Amino acid sequence: MKLKPNDRICQDAEPIALIYRSMGTKVAEEVVSRALNELTLSISGMAQQVEGKDLMTLARQLRRLERMATQLGLVSLSRVALDVRNCLEGEDVTAFAAVWARFLRVAKRSLAAENGALDQQI
C-alpha cells in the first residue's frame, strides 16, 4: 500500500498585508520576494545538510526559519519547523525522519505559489 500524505497548509495573510501597508507596494514586493528566496535557499541548504548527516547547526537554522515563516504568515511551515527541531533536540531519529519528510512536503506546498524555484532545489 502506498501512503499519500496530505498535509493541510495554513497561511495568515495579515503579516504580508502589514508589510505592504507599512512599506508600500514596490518596496514590499522586493522585501517579500527576497525573504521568500532566502527561505527557499535556507530549506535547500538544510536538505543538503540532512542528506550529508551534518546536523550540528540544523536546530539553529530551523529556529531562524521558524521566525521568518511566522513573519511571512507561513503558519504550517513555522509549526513543522518547530516539530523538526523538537525531534532533533530530543534525539529521536525515527521521529526526525518522519517529521523531516513532512517538513519538506509542507515547505514545497507553502512556497510553491510564491516561488516556483523550490521544487527544483529540494
Image (tube, helix red, strand yellow):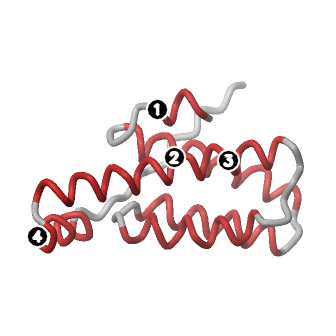
Q: Secondary structure at mark 4?
A: helix
Quarter of the image for the N terminus: give it. Answer: top right
* First of labels 4, 3 by sequence position: 4
The numbered disc on residue 117 is: 1
CA gap, disc 2 and disc 1: 8 Å
CA gap, disc 2 and disc 4: 24 Å
**Who's the residue at 24% across and 64% down the image?**
16
- Residue matched to label 4: 21
Where residue 92 appears, as percent x and y from the top left, is 87, 65
* First of labels 1, 4 by sequence position: 4
Q: Relative to 102, does residue 84 appear above or below in the rendering?
A: below
- Residue 112 image-quadrant placement: top left
CA gap, disc 4 and disc 3: 32 Å
The numbered disc on residue 45 is: 3
* First of labels 3, 2 by sequence position: 2
Where residue 70 appears, as percent x and y from the top left, is 42, 70
Q: Relative to 7, does residue 20 appear above or below in the rendering?
A: below
CA gap, disc 3 and disc 2: 9 Å
Q: Secondary structure at mark 2?
A: helix
Q: Does the CB distance between marks 2 and 1 fall below 8 Å? A: yes
* First of labels 2, 1 by sequence position: 2
Q: Amino acid at mark 3?
A: Gly
Q: Amino acid at mark 4?
A: Arg
- Residue matched to label 2: 40
* First of labels 3, 1 by sequence position: 3
Label 3: how many Cα within 10 Å (few below 14, some 14–19, many 20+) = some
Label 1: how many Cα within 10 Å (few below 14, some 14–19, many 20+) = some
**Who's the residue at 58% across and 39% down the image?**
5
**Who's the residue at 58% across and 70% down the image?**
64
**Who's the residue at 21% across and 60% down the image?**
28
Q: Amino acid at mark 1?
A: Ala
